[in-house]
Image (cartoon, coloured by chain):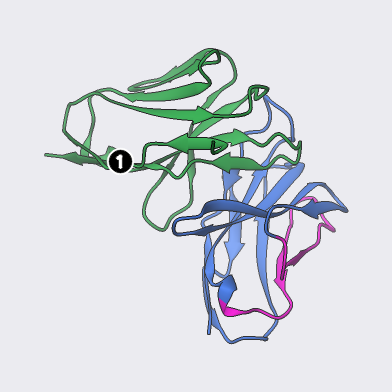
Chain colours: A blue, B green
Amino acid sequence: EAQVTQNPRYLITVTGKKLTVTCSQNMNHEYMSWYRQDPGLGLRQIYYSMNVEVTDKGDVPEGYKVSRKEKRNFPLILESPSPNQTSLYFCASSRRLAAPYNEQFFGPGTRLTVL
Amino acid sequence: RKEVEQDPGPFNVPEGATVAFNCTYSNSASQSFFWYRQDCRKEPKLLMSVYSSGNEDGRFTAQLNRASQYISLLIRDSKLSDSATYLCAVPGSSNTGKLIFGQGTTLQVKP
């Protein structure tokens, strides 16, 4: 089954404790992206990757890192989480950047709480 | 003007009704448009993609009006299971692949 998977699905942690949220897709998609969703602010892009070893900042990259060593994986790293990073996180992927291959498919989400 | 704007609703309709949502966008150069469905606390699921004037899939029809810069989603014969939030998304102008989402329109279909 074609899908985007994320782990963990739920995480409660404390300020400053490094964590990684994994994202994997099995569709051989070139493009991958991370979004966060907050009430009243909608979905905002954190980082994106156009292909292996090609990553760049989105709209809200502060406090996050990413890597793209393999095509299928795009982990999101919080080196020192803070309470303002409490949010619902989604990983997404698309076949390519440009239309008509730019339909993005989302993972199930990771609900993160930072105390 | 927001880059992508939707009427948040809620839209409360009876089963069997036809309901339409509009979404306006500011980037006149946009070439692709998407409607997603999101259930509470779950991931957005792609409902329809629009690359030209419109698209139809069963009870769902999406139409694009480039001159007025809006896309619409029409749902015919509403089912209880259609109750959800519908998100309009348009690629940003910066060629980052970023989707800019509207705030979503909430639909509640009642028996």
| Residue farthest along the right direction in this orientation | A53
Query: Would you say residue A31 sits in the magenta stretch?
Result: no
In the displayed structure image, the side of residue A48 where residue B28 appears, left or right? left
- Closest to the observer, A86 or B15: A86
Say which residue appears at 37% left-offset and 50% top-offset: B39
In the displayed structure image, the side of residue A37 where residue A23 appears, left or right? right
Residue A50 at x, y = what percent? 80, 44
Element type where label 1 sits in the image: loop
Task: Judge whether residue B104 can be spotted in this image.
Answer: yes
- Decide: is A22 above or below B3: below
Q: Which residue is mark 1?
A: B9
- Decide: is B89 above or below A89: above
- Decide: is B52 above or below B89: above
Residue B58 at x, y = what percent? 36, 21
In the displayed structure image, the side of residue A90 where residue B71 appears, left or right? left
- Closest to the observer, B67 or B11: B67
Q: Mark 1, residues whose alpha carbon is within 10 Å: few (<14), some, or many (≥20)?
A: few
In the displayed structure image, the side of residue B4 where residue A79 appears, left or right? right
- Closest to the observer, B65 or B44: B65
Say which residue appears at 54% left-offset and 29% top-offset: B25
Say which residue appears at 68% left-offset and 22% top-offset: B29
Residue A46 at x, y = what percent? 68, 57
Is the N terminus of chain A in the top left, top right, bottom left or bottom right quadrant? top right
By secondary structure, the bulk of the magenta-drawn segment is best described as: loop
- The amino acid type found where label 1 is placed reads Gly
Say which residue appears at 40% left-offset and 27% top-offset: B22
Query: Would you say residue A67 sits in the magenta stretch?
Result: yes
- Decide: is A9 above or below B110: below
**Which span is picked out in magenta?**
A61-83
Image quadrant in which you'd find residue B100: top right
Residue A108 at x, y = what percent? 51, 56
